[in-house]
Image: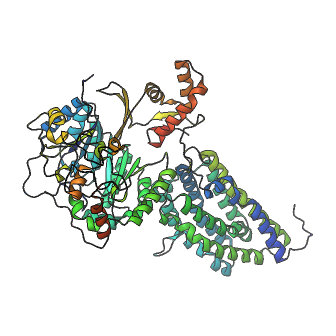
Amino acid sequence: MSDRDASIWDRESFVERLRALGMSRYHHEHPFHRAMNEGRLTPEQLRGWVANRFYYQRHIPIKDAAILSNCPLREVRRIWIHRLSDHDGRGGEPGGLEAWLRLAEGVGLGREETLAGTLVLPGVRFAVEAYVTFCRTEPWPIAVASSLTELFAPDLMKERLEAFEKHYSWIPASGLDYFRSRVTQARKDSSEGLELVMAHCATRELQERAVRALSFKCDLLWAMLDAITLAYGIGGSGSPGKELSEVSLGNGNVRLARHARVKGDPVTGKPTLLYPEGMMILNSTGEAIVRLCDGERTARDIVASLATRYQVSPEALERDVTEFLGRLRDRQLVEVDR
Amino acid sequence: MMQLQSPYRPLGLLAELTYRCPLGCPYCSNPVFSGPQGAELTTEEWIRVLGEGAELGVVHALFSGGEPVLRKDLARLVAAAREKDLYTNLITSAIGLSRAKLLELKSAGLDSIQISFQSDEAAGADYIAGIPAHEKKLEAARWVRDAELPLTVNVVLHRGNISRIEQLVGLAVSLGAHRLELAHTQYYGWALRNRKALLPSRAEVEEAGRVAERAKTALRGELEILYVRPDYFGDRPKPCMNGWGRRYLTVSPEGDVLPCPTAREIPSLIFENVRRRPLRDIWERSEAFNRFRGTGWMPEPCRSCPEREVDFGGCRCQAAILSGDPGRTDPACALSPHRGNLLDILDAENEEADFQYRENP
């Protein structure tokens, strides 16, 4: 691909090539990020993202240390080294990873769970490890070029911060410190990185490799979100702003929560559903639905079973069943597998 | 199937096992005592009361206090309630709970647990509790999650924490709670004594309501948020206890049976005791349970009000406190002739004041 005879790009056209690439390929346009910034993610989807993104975050100082170890130039190392303590902290400064853990706690993930990485997806693990390997094995100016996605990060952080404050107000403000600090930090880091790439990718070949490194990095970030989207989905019936709550037919198996009990009322004989500090009197359809929430059936299976029992078409029952299950799920009385 | 002719049928029995409590929250709903109290019911007496409750149609046993885990026989009482096929709920500060005790309660059949939190951060929470309690509560909540019991987080709202709804929601989410009850302080007992220090401003109440509504929608299916607008700041009264002597009964530590936990605010009521009379008798025939049942006792404007069976005329204790007569319309209703008394309080009591901690009896 590279044209060895071609002349070196001047600074302006080199920068322009990097920018154009990022503008079109950076993950700010990924459907998962768009949904996040529009407030369409469920708490579980946000948690999935935080847990997986943390795996990426914790490897940043490792890849930066790899870049340092490959770089023979003292003046470059002096510029680069603050990235380690930015994330790991230093002295009394807790650092970016700690801020990220606070976000994890803020969205309801356990600190130990986050650190143990139990929720990390294979695709994310693969992408992150590929990134570290890349930075370990490529010449240091090329590895630095892969970090230039930072050029586009400040805008994304700013947008994300506003979106979180607006749409996910249940997350404590202290959980958002990382984004807050990254708006200015990423701006400073990216101009640092850009200057190093300009100065040390001094042949056309290195320039083209730098562009390809940025392209690799954009793909890697995009692929992480693909994996997260596949595992957690986007939006859903529990998503904010949706007035009518229902469990959709296509969702997973439905199971009555352990703490909900069906019992015949001792006074009226009517079936009732008992749960913490409350109860619900069930009609016969309600009872039949609840008894079918055995973890072996989806909402669609429940509809089919009732349709057979009552000799009616499934379409006639669908709405009642999905709405009723939605109400039960809102009160934590049924669990729906993913 | 049991026979019950009365339209009044208790669904929940609030068993206040003891008034003793290690915390000193200044809004405690326990009575402000003076003088010595009777002895607490024995294990056997409580077991009999739970059985009599089940016979009456009770389906929920709510173990509360004071601090119910101070009773060494709590697991036995939970087991007894489960034997009567009651759904068992523990309402606790979690102080005095250990992991072992929790597991003992679970194997006795405990169905659910509610832990009170005073705030989302230790300093503010411990200031209200009067002892360092917050960290212990966090730990206990994690045991609850590990034991796979459904957790309700309860927070009483007042001037000191009302601006922290978002953080309180965050706390409940991070603890893996199923439900979050954001309950405004009800001004009876200790809270009434400390009203000047606890009452939030109207603006704070409105903002809290907005934040709670937003969180409720955002967390639908994830965390059930119960936020009830405080009656002091509304136009209509709360349907207190879902009607007097209609759905709930409270048994005090020494066996008095009350239509609601704060009914002692009404000095003219005399309460019967389970040591002397069967629970069914007290529920169906005692003067205290019958005085404000139905709509026959109502004065105007309640009597002709289309909402008389929606809010049941509001809270009898509050009518007594704010108007001097428990048989009047609750001044939390904008139609009450004594509404002015409430509005005066809202104007006068929104200022800096110290509170007094609750004291044990």
Please name the residue shown 17% across and 32% down the image.
Answer: B280
**A94 to B262, vertically: above or below:** below
Residue A53 sits above or below residue B15 on the image:
below
Determine the image quadrant of residue B42. top left
Residue furthest to the right in view is A5
Is residue B24 visible from the viewing direction of this image? Answer: no
Q: As drawn, is B144 to the left or to the right of A178?
A: left
**On screen, residue A100 above or below A196:** above
Residue A181: x, y in percent?
Answer: 56, 71
Of the 4 image quadrants, the one containing the C terminus of chain B is bottom left
Q: Locate the N terminus of chain B and report the quarter of the image it occupies.
A: top left
Residue toward you, A205 or A193: A193
Type of colouring: rainbow
- Give percent across and percent down for residue B278: 13, 33
Please give left or right for residue A216 compared with residue A248 in the image.
right
**In the picture provided, is B153 more to the left or to the right than A99?**
left
Residue at 18 percent across and 33 percent down: it is B284
Q: Is residue B68 visible?
A: yes
Tell me how many marks there are.
Answer: 0
Q: Quadrant of residue B357?
A: bottom left
Locate residue A233, reporting x and y percent.
61, 46
Query: Residue B345: which quarter of the image?
Result: bottom left
Residue at the bottom extreme, as displayed: A75
Q: Position of residue B71 (x, y in %)?
A: 18, 47
